[in-house]
Image (tube, rainbow, N blue to C red):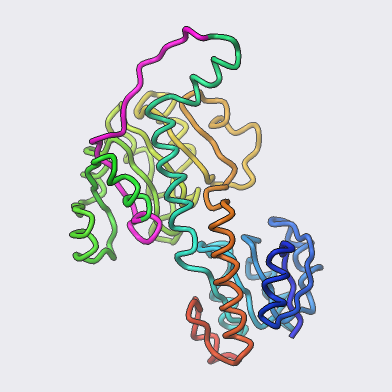
Amino acid sequence: MKIVGTCSEEMLGMLREAGIEADAKMISLFNKEEIMEKVKGYDCWINFGHICPGEVIEELSDSLKMICRCGIGYDQIDIDTATKKGICVTNTAGSMNESVGETAVLLMLELMRKFYLYNRHLMQGDWTWRIPANGLTGKTIGFVGFGGIGQGCADLLKGFQCKFLVYDNYIKDEVLQKYGAKAVDLDTLAGESDVVSLHCPLTDETRGLINYDFFSKMKKNAYIVNTARGPVINEKDLIRALQKGLIAGAGLDVYEVEPVTGDNPLLSMENVIALPHIGSQTVESQHVTQIQAIENLKQFLEGKVPVNCLNPDFMKFK
């Protein structure tokens, strides 16, 4: 089978050790025409977060048999169209729990302690600048979604003696008990949390879930952190809430439209920390992700349905 991906030298070496040859190509994450041109004719595509709407899958479907996602989120891939074209789609569930959890905690600390502002003023030669800051210890953290990444974040926050509220329609009681967390409705979570941290996937159910009504119910000294997917938040409502002082600030690694452009008002707000969707970008996390992706490839090439297959019904359409 012909395999292609924007693979690092490390991953190419790992693939060869597994007896798999792949072509390494630099492929734009967001340019549909370039993706179709460079992936066309290949059987397997190692996808590193590239957009893959239905029209791209339609164009590639003559040869494409597998989309091997290096990462967890797959909202950028049209799973239904892939299934109907008999294309297997996999991800690397669990590979980024620690790295994205760390990012969420980092954003909480930065927002509450104002380290980023102190750094900015110090770089400008101002040693005496002071602003009131809050500690994270003992605060109430509200999790919207409490899967692997949310739990990874909570593992780190245990040392801060934080209290956990959880809004997750699919959470199991034993998980709540493990973390001493309390399941609540969305309004309660908004009203009682010192920090709201988003860790849910992007679905029809969660798109725009966090809106102006939600912000209006938050404490005025509370913060929101999003390391999940940008469209979970209605961005216009977030900007409005920040401008009106409904909440104290936001820590963002994801946005409604990516890549985010320089004219986005969020990038010029002093109470916003903005990162370029790099929450999972650690050497350790990427290594684990690559190992899992290669295992998915191996299983598929052996004629098996990979453990991390997102659409097992693809077999009906092969």
Residue at the image point whose x is 32% and y is 38% from the top: 195
Residue at the image point whose x is 53% and y is 70% from the top: 91
Q: Is residue 12 left or right of residue 80?
A: right
Residue at the image point whose x is 57% and y is 51% from the top: 281
Q: Where is 108 relative to 311, above or below?
A: above
Quarter in which the C terminus is drawn: bottom right
Quarter in which the N terminus is drawn: bottom right
Q: Main secondary structure of the magenta part?
A: loop
Give how far across and how far down residue 278 sits, in percent.
57, 47
Q: Where is 249 relative to 179, above or below?
A: above
The part of the image, by quadrant, that contains residue 265 is: top right
The part of the image, by quadrant, that contains residue 290 is: bottom right
Give how far across and how far down residue 108 sits, in percent.
39, 36
The part of the image, by quadrant, that contains residue 197 is: top left
In front: 98, or 191? 98
Residue stretch rendered in magenta on the structure:
127-151
Whether residue 128 appears in magenta in the rendering, the answer is yes
Q: Outermost residue toward the front? A: 17
Q: Is residue 134 left or right of residue 73?
A: left
Give how far across and how far down residue 38 sits, in percent.
80, 68
Q: Is residue 294 left or right of residue 170?
A: right
Residue at the image point whose x is 23% and y is 38% from the top: 191
Total number of numbered discs in the rendering: 0
Whether residue 139 appears in magenta in the rendering, the answer is yes
In front: 285, or 240? 285
Q: Where is 186 relative to 201, above or below?
A: above
